[in-house]
Amino acid sequence: MRPIERALISVSDKTGVTEFAAGLAELNVEIVSTGNTHRLLSSKGIRVREISEFTGFPEMLDGRVKTLHPRVAAGVLAVRGNCEHMRQIDEHRIQMIDLVCVNLYPFAETIRKPDVSFNEAIENIDIGGPSLIRAGAKNFEDIAVVTSPEDYDMVLAGLRSGNGALNRETLLALARQAFLYTARYDARIAEYLSKTSSDDVLFPPNLFADFEKTRGLRYGENPHQKAAFYRWAGRARRGIAAAKQMQGKELSYNNIVDLEAARELVSEFDKPACAIIKHTNPCGAAVGNDLREAYLKAYQADSLSAFGSIIGFNRNVDGATAEEAVKLFVEAIIAPDFNADAIKILSTKTHLRLVTLGDDFGFHEQFEMKPVSGGVLLQETDRVLLGPESHVVTQRKPSEREARNLDFAWRVVKHVKSNAIVLADNGCTVGVGAGQMSRVDPVKISIQKAHPTSKGAVLASDAFFPFRDGIDEAAKGGITAVIQPGGSVRDNEVIQAADENGMAMIFTGLRHFKH
């Protein structure tokens, strides 16, 4: 590859640019620069040519026009091995540019400001910068294009080891990164303008999703399926994508899905809470006066299913809780953090994955995205608990104890696959019926699985009862109170069944399907 003899530097983010330019100067690279970048480098004693001297044309229109000039474009786009290109370059006395170091106006940062005006946002749309980057990236066989301060040291090291030239592999990698950079930049602009021009700001006419691969996974839901983990790009790391694994085997696809389910469920509660998850459903969930109590209650709710599960805690795990949890074989535990005693105890299980999220534990995305063939579904995250018309519909009102348990069961049933029934007592699940095709079957299953008994427990249903049979089955199991959305054409029959069995029933006016 040819040595780099001339570089054009024009950056908005000036992190490390002085050191980078000084390194280029040490390699006898001539530096051409613009506006504030030129002033900064000159003030640091680096010899720099101003862009207007290079083009023979002044910067104008408040800096909107400075690099948009044939002498710049031709110097970047000319293919060195093309004789006709080089003849025209000589004819017009064009000086070649071998390296383009550009980053763009901070559009994304500007529109995040709460008081940003539309005009301010528009003025932070870079024009010359993307053109230079794309030109350099297109001509990567001859041009190095550098868009990130993180690459400055790598580029300088490559030039020093390559006698002033970069190898093709490095040039191609820089070009690939450059096109990704401009694509993300344009996407942010298009997204912003799409929202400002749409009547439906919540769901704009175009959706721009940019994800970057964080790591490959051993396999997907099954060993024959390949998988990888991606995070939202261009955003602060949040949620599971920001989780830190403290110990244990590599997280699998299913581990990550279940960790998210555990985190979401325990985040429903202010009191110390524990959720024991299998295949995204809770086999046990509880709140307690402390984390150890919450764990023991959740475990005893279905100790058989708890084997090989994922455990979620909404408090930092202490030694007393770890002493109990270490007795059970589980795949992973997620919590805001683990104290030193807990780590010492749990580290005896070398394969056990410990995952922390710190203060970000309760983070929730505004939207949920679900892929389908040919597209995606987008919806708001289900963060509302009760409808405004929530009320008691039976002759008997819930007791204070029943009301507490109904509130607990209603928060848990949100996180169980539909059709879903949760039985609860004393701030703990008693039985869970998940993912059934009829409404009455999960009632029967939850009563069958109830531990120690369904008698005296309350019942939460994620959707209405279409017939009274579900209430009659609940009564046979000794259920004393029910919380459900209501809205069935047979609500009167369902209410009548509850009254006949002496039950209290609340209609929430809000369902919580989870598909």
Image (cartoon, rainbow, N blue to C red):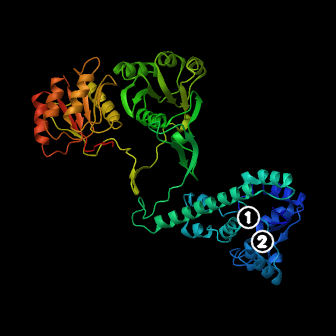
In the image, is residue 54 above or below residue 368? below
Q: CA distance from mark 1 to mark 2?
A: 10 Å
Name the residue carrying label 1.
141
Name the residue carrying label 2.
81
> At numbered mark 2, what does the secondary structure look like: helix, strand or loop?
loop
Residue visible at 77% across and 71% down in the picture: 81
**Displayed quadrant of residue 88:** bottom right
- Count every numbered label the image shows and give the total: 2
Name the quadrant of the C terminus: top left
Residue 67 placed where, x, y %? 73, 74
Tell me the kind of residue under disc 1. Glu
Marks 1 and 2 in Cβ contact (< 8 Å): yes
Mark 2, other Cα within 10 Å: few <14 / some 14–19 / many ≥20 = few
Residue 395 visible in the current orientation: no
Residue 123 placed where, x, y %? 62, 70
Residue 162 placed where, x, y %? 84, 54
Tell me the kind of residue under disc 2. Gly
Q: Which mark is residue 446?
A: none
Residue 419 visible in the current orientation: yes
In-front residue for pair 358/141:
141
> At numbered mark 1, what does the secondary structure look like: helix, strand or loop?
loop
Residue visible at 50% across and 38% down in the picture: 219
Mark before the other along the chain sequence, 1 or 2: 2
Q: Is residue 109 left or right of residue 433?
A: right
The residue mark sitting in front, 1 or 2, is: 2
Mark 1, other Cα within 10 Å: few <14 / some 14–19 / many ≥20 = some
Name the quadrant of the N terminus: bottom right
In-front residue for pair 473/76:
76
Residue 431 placed where, x, y %? 29, 25
Residue visible at 47% across and 23% down in the picture: 330
Q: Is residue 284 left or right of residue 37?
A: left
**Displayed quadrant of residue 262:** top left
